[in-house]
Image: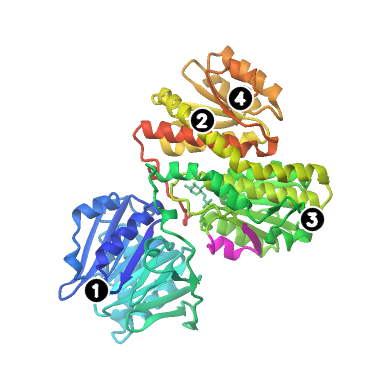
Amino acid sequence: MCGIVGYTGFQEAYSVVVNGLKRLEYRGYDSAGVVLEVPESGFYIAKTKGKVADLVSISQSFEGKARIGMGHTRWATHGVPSDKNAHPHLSNNGKISIVHNGIIENYDTIKKILTDKGYTFGSETDTEVLVNFIQYFMDTDPALDFSEAVRYALNEVYGAYAIAVMHRDFHGELVVARLGSPLAIGLGEKEYFIASDASPFVEFTKEAIYLEEGHMATISLDKGVDIRTIKGNERITPAIQELKLSLEEIEKGGYEHFMLKEIFEQPKSIHDTLRGRVLVDEGIIKMAGIWDHLERFSKADRIIIIACGTSWHAGLTGEYLIEEYARIPVEVEYASEFRYRNPIITERDVVIAISQSGETADTMAAIKLAKEKGAFIYGICNVVDSSIARISDAGSYTHAGPEIGVASTKAFTAQLTILSLIALKLGKHNGNLGNAEFMKLISELETLPKKIEEVLETTHGSIKEMSKNFLEVSNFLYLGRGYNFPTALEGALKLKEISYIHAEGYPAAEMKHGPIALIDENMPIVIIAPQKGHYDKIVSNVQEIKARKGKVISVVNYADSRVSKMSDYTIEIPDSSECFSPILASVPLQLMAYYIAVYRGANVDQPRNLAKSVTVE
Ligand code: G6P
């Protein structure tokens, strides 16, 4: 949610900043801006409503003269997307410039104090209040150091933020701070980078510092990186990390969109999720996070899964998996509801928090609440070292690699894979899953990458063709039962997120209690009907749909004979145990959503109003 980038060094700051913004655009893309310190003339600011490409068309680079600068790509919170609300923002005296990711919750109180003292505001943002608040401290005490003024101001605000600030009189200095939103500092040879994640600087350096919660840093070529705590001003020796990220991972690699690339990466991402964890020869699942805490899980009265969006859908499938194989009661909660409804949590609860980004504000807050009540927190994150990964007591990374398309695809199937591992491991440990069944299932897990490859090869062309038939449709229904009820929810979410067609997912049997009223010859209904599980029941549901002339698109196994006969379109996937069918069935649904959106002319990687990591509640 909003991307921040900054640079100080010997390169042309404009290019580094603008190219960095393009990589961070997944975080927000309703407006963009840049500030450069141009020798002898001060700050140059260009900002606009729209995308980074729009910024490029209205801005200039100063041909290498500017060596320090910052940029921002925005997902609006306070104030509509507009030129004036776009970042960077300037203080009233024109000397301080800021870019900000997050929300300053008490901005209206501060704004009132500042307004009474004569400060004026040209935007509706909380960010402009913060930059003037910093000026206020410097106006009050002209001897105050710039970074100290930033620290004073931050000590008075509540909310969540990552900020970067520059002052015209403190040449070559970038001041950054973080509380609740991520910020990485790239350490180059005679150059420094700052960014919301390491992608903007990965081609320039492999060394980075991830700023910790409640820390700030003053960065300059002369003094290096000076890290202190925001509260106590205590100096911190940072941990320098080696970046594992490669440029290849964050580029499109010949695909038209990141989303398509990420859909096609799934054989590899599932393989990477499983790597080193399933040891069929030894008959074990080896996952450090679970291994070390098996007793904690086994003694749990219940497991509560908390997540948002697609990760919540993975959590629902997790409920089916864990209850079936480990026989531990599971509750799945939207983090945003859980955190505010005074839930009953005890020390005997285990909370599994699922988050691709590891940053989602509601999930973070729900974890903090559960932690306070003594629950054990197990995090499932994709982004290594993310806030949720750090705050959890233990956990597993999904290792799906960077996911840049806003609609989650490979991270989702990786989450399902991790949840399968957890369920099978716990089931084996507590004796609910016999050895023969365990061995069969873990051997099958290893075949999933190959099966996904097969799904991609055999369905891609026909789904691309079939999708052309649904461009004018206004509503879709997705139905599934058992393990594939969450698959239906996720299929519907994918379609609505990127194509803007209204879509709903339902348990197939619930259709009769409402959605059936919508069915007519214009209504496409996606039925997820692998042969295991509740196949016969699904057959009856399809009959009910056909009796009302609905258009059926079914996802079935190769050997299917009944549902496919009644379907208008059939997508075939390989046979599998029921518990793994969501992983296989999700892939063609992702492809279908992708092609419908592409044919409708939508920007699939950056759907309107959405952002990849939601760091505000
Ligand atoms: C946003 C994204 C979704 C994602 C959700 C939860 O809404 O657009 O794709 O599922 O956040 O994100 P998380 O990073 O916690 O999985």
Element type where label 2 sits in the image: helix
Callouts 3 and 2 close, C-beta under 8 Å: no
Q: Amino acid at mark 3?
A: Ser
Q: Give the farthest residue toward the bottom.
A: 143
Sequence-wise first label, 1 or 2:
1
Image depth: mark 3 or mark 2 in front: 2
Q: Amino acid at mark 4?
A: Met
Q: Image quarter for residue 8?
A: bottom left
**The N terminus - image quarter:** bottom left
Report the residue at 49% width, 42% height from top: 263
> Where residue 345 appears, x then y in whole percent?
70, 56
Compared across the picture, whether 595 is left or right of 586 comes to left
Element type where label 4 sits in the image: helix
Residue that mark 1 sits on: 95
Residue that mark 2 sits on: 459
Distance between the alpha carbons at the discs numbered 3 and 2: 41 Å
> Where residue 224 appears, x then y in whole percent?
38, 81
- Residue 353: say if magenta: no
Sequence-wise first label, 4 or 3:
3
Distance between the alpha carbons at the discs numbered 4 and 3: 37 Å
Q: Amino acid at mark 2?
A: Thr
**Vertically, is 403 above or below 35?**
above
Q: Amino acid at mark 1?
A: Lys
Which label is found at residue 312? none
Image depth: mark 4 or mark 2 in front: 2
Residue that mark 3 sits on: 298
- Residue 387: say if magenta: yes
Compared across the picture, whether 68 is left or right of 147 comes to left
